[in-house]
Amino acid sequence: MRRVDNFNPGPAALPLEVLEQVREELIDFRGAGMSVMEMSHRSKEYEAIHNEAQARLRRLLGIPDDYRVLFLQGGASLQFAMIPMNFLRAGDRALYVLTGAWSEKARDEAVRFGEIAVNDWATKGGYRDIPEAIPEDDGSFRYVHITSNNTIYGTQWPALPKTASPLVADMSSDILSRPIEVSDFALIYAGAQKNLGPSGVTVVIAKDAFLAEANSDLPAMLRYSTHVKSNSLYNTPPTFAIYVMERVLAWVEEMGGLAAVAERNRRKAALVYEAIDGHPHLYLGHAEKRARSQMNVTFRLASEELERAFLSEAAEKGFVGLKGHRSVGGCRVSLYNAVPVEAAERLAHFMDDFARRH
């Protein structure tokens, strides 16, 4: 078996231990005589998986009792539209804080449904930094929307903001990477394919009081109340993705929870940033140091020729997924939870060696 060092931005690395268990249970899930992929989503075997995934997520994030946990489909991209559809009425305003491409996409969907104000402070520097405050938020907004981590530009809120208006966050790329205070948020959403599990399932965590104010005159599948009432089983959920996610959540618990995972992620990011900072004439980091992401390290090299050489040699060494997003180019190292510290060590060593040779 050959396993590469996987730095893909999503779908991304999964824990090897989880993949091995999934392989063992793939054909016969714990004596059921069939795979999870073959089970009815109404069966007691699948219901146990579904409920255990919710329970593990609640334990890991310390989700209060007055919050619902939903497993939906459509990715964060569908949430960009569902949130304003459900929560903006005539006369309501929402505030969108732009910190990267995905926050722009969320804003672009929201303007279809209501009045949108924008904090565009970060755009002026080319998305290199994160605002220290949100001065526009005077408490009058239906909600304030942020993107907690920016995969394309490699920035992250160093501390998640406190807001006067209800706070909504796209945490697709850094959920479960560090402890958070869920009670500071009205709604959190995240595509699973980076830290939670495989692609195909989207987690939504929402406060009951916020959900109670949602619009009801919407198609059933686009109403949060539909999924709350049915425990995310209104239609067939992505059962296999939820099963793998439950196993990933168990792995995080076994690792020691979010405090232990956060320290592991800090070590990985420090290794790569040290390689960048150690060779400032070759590696040109994008993000300001205070806003550097622990999940996605982005940088350019001193020339396009060196960039091509770097990516080519990295591929030969078994480093996968280092090419930057097509919209900005450059290089990107994604260091989600399942990426081992040893992989970051090997990459940092390669970066130091490449710098000495060039």
Image (cartoon, rainbow, N blue to C red):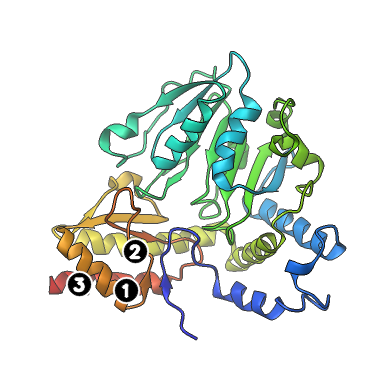
Name the residue rendered at 77%, 68% in the picture.
38
Circles 1 and 2 in contact, beta carbons < 8 Å: yes
Closer mark to the observer between disc 1 and disc 3: 1
- Eyeballing the image, is 301 above or below 113? below
Q: Which sits earlier in the primary sequence, circle 1 or circle 2? A: 1
- Eyeballing the image, is 103 above or below 4? above
Left or right relative to 242: residue 113:
left
- Amino acid type shown at disc 3: Phe
Task: Write down the residue under mark 2.
Answer: 322
Image x and y of residue 183, in percent: 63, 38
- Amino acid type shown at disc 2: Leu
Q: How many labels does the image show?
A: 3
Image x and y of residue 308, in percent: 22, 65
Name the residue rendered at 73%, 25% in the picture.
217
Image x and y of residue 70, in percent: 70, 46
Name the residue rendered at 73%, 55% in the picture.
55
For the residues marked 1 and 2, what is the alpha-carbon distance in whole angstroms?
Answer: 9 Å
Closer mark to the observer between disc 3 and disc 2: 2
Rate crowding at label 1 as few (under 14), some (14 to 19) or many (20 or more) other CA atoms within 10 Å.
Answer: some
Left or right relative to 58: residue 8:
left
- Eyeballing the image, is 330 above or below 155? below
Rate crowding at label 3 as few (under 14), some (14 to 19) or many (20 or more) other CA atoms within 10 Å.
Answer: some
Residue 354 marker: 3
Name the residue rendered at 46%, 37% in the picture.
105
Name, please, the residue furthest toward the bottom: 1
**Quarter of the figure with residue 237:** bottom right
Helix, strand or loop at mark 1 = helix
Q: Split into 4 quadrants, where in the image is the C terminus? A: bottom left
Residue 315 marker: 1
Rate crowding at label 2 as few (under 14), some (14 to 19) or many (20 or more) other CA atoms within 10 Å.
Answer: many
